Image (spheres, rainbow, N blue to C red):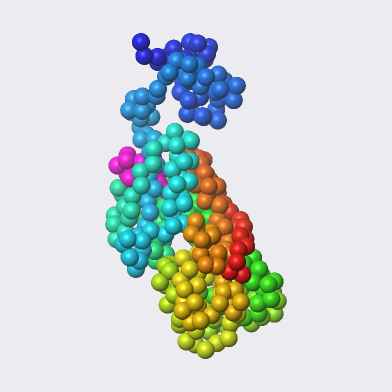
Amino acid sequence: MKATSFDIAYRAGVSQSTVSRALRNSPLVNEETRLKVQAIAKELNYKVDKNARNLRSQQSHTIALLLFEDKSIDDSQINPFFMSMLASITRACSLQGYDLLVSFQQMNNDWHAEYEDTNRADGLILLGYGDYVHYKEKLKQLSEQGTHFIRWGAEVKDMAVATIGCDNINGGFLLTKHLLNKGNKSCAFIGTASQRAPELYDRYRGYCQALESVGIEIDEQLQVDAMYTEEGGYLATKELLARNVSFDSIFAATDLIAIGALRALKDNGLKVPDDVAVVGFDDIPIASFTSPALTTAKQDTALAGRLLVDNLLKLIGGEKPSTLLIPTQIIERKSC
């Protein structure tokens, strides 16, 4: 005969509602009782009936991860950093007993009304954004309709939006200081430096702060916008070389941009790091396999996934999560 939650409650000497909370890892149940209930459930081979639970709670016990496409990038490409984030978010959801629904979105889609509003998901995690100016309007819509959502990215200053992100300013500062400490004196920056890409802009701000801290003036000729791709990094580096300005190092705003920069420098007969040192940002898996291996700033995607899921569940539960910035770690390899 199939065991029920009432059987577990009888064996554990607790109420059926306590059993339900313990099996959800609710903080309302003390650890001793929670472990006792879970041990009995395992002994009885008890399985939660998700359909019945969802009907009772009016929740789907599903989180929707909305990954936004940048239409300026080839459809076949997905940023490897996002793939690392996807893996960590999936793992974090599993540990919390939630299913994860992954959907690729475009900014012109009416995605803000498709998930929580129709009970397909209890809350949303937003990853990526393309042009931030358009994306910000969607955030405003979500906030106004009371949707439970959290996002990965730069802090939103003028809206009460729960955000988990990387400390991009400090990461940019530390990477630039690393270049300077290696004896480089003329550092170029490749990557968008505007509010349309706030994460990259924060990295640029950190770069500027590091240069100013040692009395080096900011040279606008040493900054070139670049798409988030290897090809973007390649073309931006070619433009930098065409400007005939002197530089001994390149801070690429992402690892993909840095990989493109490495190829452009090689095609122009320049050796890395002998002629030009190069650093990236993200520490995607391929960064350790480039030639030479890429020095970069590591974003802790495992911690990011846990924080996104845990704080979204707090928000769903009626708590008010705060914006958190994760520190970066410099990974030194052969390109610098």
The reply to whether the magenta stretch includes residue 117 is: yes
| Residue at the image position 53 percent from the left and 80 percent from the top | 270
Q: Which of the 4 quarters of the picture holds residue 222?
A: bottom right
Q: Residue at x 58, y 69 (%)?
A: 335
Question: From where the camera sits, is residue 157 visible?
Answer: no
* Quadrant where the image shows the C terminus: bottom right
Residue in view at x 39 percent, y 24 percent: 48
> 93 or 187, which is in the foreground?
187
Q: Residue at x 70, y 80 (%)?
A: 215
- Whether residue 279 is in magenta: the answer is no
The residue stretch that appears in magenta: 115-125
Q: Quadrant of the N terminus?
A: top left
Number of numbered markers: 0
What x and y, as percent, mark residue 69? Answer: 35, 60
Residue 329 visible here: yes
Q: Nearer the viewer, residue 86 or 37?
A: 86
